[in-house]
Image: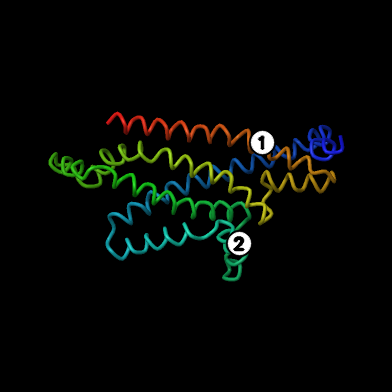
């Protein structure tokens, strides 16, 4: 009973639930913002790496390598605590969204590059033979095919971003984990942390299953071809 009262106290969970919901709202907003900006930036970096002039290709490659190697927590701390020394002050939400977006952009760029390079070069040649300009061929012929290949890994990256939003609590952003920690301190009971874990599981488990389904469907489609 002591274990239940300490970690699974129903009364404490009910009292802390509104606090956790506020944190959940912030977590969802942060995750969606990071995914939107990270995906768009990643696609732009991918195209820069593949088709830009050589200096820009090298710059894109360096960006991808650096931000795939750096832990998100390090990037977040540098943005939130180091930038003020050069006169740039960002809110905790903006700092967390920027850090998550920058790292996601690097992984997205690499995934998209692999997807585009997986398309046979004959597709470009056929589009050129039809008189399509390069960027039109890329937008209407190559990218629609590449998207089908990269959807599973991109979805997996999105799940990782939502998990990594918990790092925003380091810069005092009131996300789900930070609210759970504050509720734990307020109520002198760790049950809010268990509640946060349950909420994370309820949201992310269906997404994990979606990733598995998309990967299995992609394998079937590749096998059919």
Residue 165: horizontal and vertical position, in percent?
60, 48
Residue 129: horizontal and vertical position, in percent?
12, 41
Which residue is drawn at the image coordinates 42% and 58% (left, top)?
64
Residue 182: horizontal and vertical position, in percent?
77, 48
Which residue is drawn at the image coordinates 60% and 61% (left, top)?
77
Q: Secondary structure at mark 2?
A: helix
Dot 2 or dot 1: first in sequence order is 2
Q: Residue furthest right?
A: 2
Kindly identify which residue carries mark 2: 77
Q: Does residue 73 sit above or below 20 in this rendering?
A: below
The one of 194 and 186 positioned closer to us in this rendering: 194
Apparent side of residue 141 relative to residue 204 in the rendered image (left or right): left
Q: Quadrant of the C terminus?
A: top left
Q: Secondary structure at mark 1?
A: helix
Q: Which mark is residue 186?
A: none
Kindly identify which residue carries mark 1: 199
Q: Are marks 2 and 1 in contact (CB under 8 Å)?
A: no
Q: CA distance from mark 2 to mark 1?
A: 26 Å
Apparent side of residue 202 relative to residue 152 in the rendered image (left or right): right
Other-residue count near label 1 (Cα within 10 Å), few / some / many at <14 / 14–19 / ≥20: some
Which residue is drawn at the image coordinates 53% and 54% (left, top)?
98
The one of 160 and 170 positioned closer to us in this rendering: 160
Which residue is drawn at the image coordinates 58% and 66% (left, top)?
83
Other-residue count near label 2 (Cα within 10 Å), few / some / many at <14 / 14–19 / ≥20: some
Residue 152: horizontal and vertical position, in percent?
43, 38
Q: Does residue 213 sit above or below 97 in this rendering?
A: above
């Amino acid at each position: 009973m002591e274990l239940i009262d300490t970690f699974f106290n129903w009364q404490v969970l009910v009292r802390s639930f509104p606090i956790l919901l506020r944190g959940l709202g912030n977590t969802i907003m942060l995750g969606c913002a990071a995914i939107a900006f990270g995906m768009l930036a990643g696609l732009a970096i991918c195209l820069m790496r593949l088709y830009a002039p050589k200096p820009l290709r090298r710059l894109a490659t360096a960006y991808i390598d650096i931000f795939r190697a750096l832990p998100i927590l390090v990037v977040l701390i540098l943005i939130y605590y180091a930038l003020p020394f050069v006169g740039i002050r960002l809110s905790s939400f903006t700092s967390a969204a920027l850090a998550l977006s920058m790292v996601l952009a690097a992984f997205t760029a690499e995934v998209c590059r692999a997807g585009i390079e997986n398309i046979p070069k004959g597709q470009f040649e056929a589009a050129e033979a039809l008189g399509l300009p390069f960027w039109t061929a890329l937008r209407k012929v190559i990218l629609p095919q590449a998207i089908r290949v990269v959807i599973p890994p991109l979805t997996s990256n999105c799940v990782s971003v939502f998990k990594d939003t918990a790092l925003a609590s380091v810069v005092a952003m009131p996300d789900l984990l930070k609210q759970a920690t504050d509720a734990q301190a307020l109520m002198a009971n760790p049950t809010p942390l268990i509640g946060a874990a349950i909420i994370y599981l309820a949201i992310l488990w269906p997404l994990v299953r979606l990733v598995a389904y998309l990967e299995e469907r992609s394998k079937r489609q590749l096998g059919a071809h």
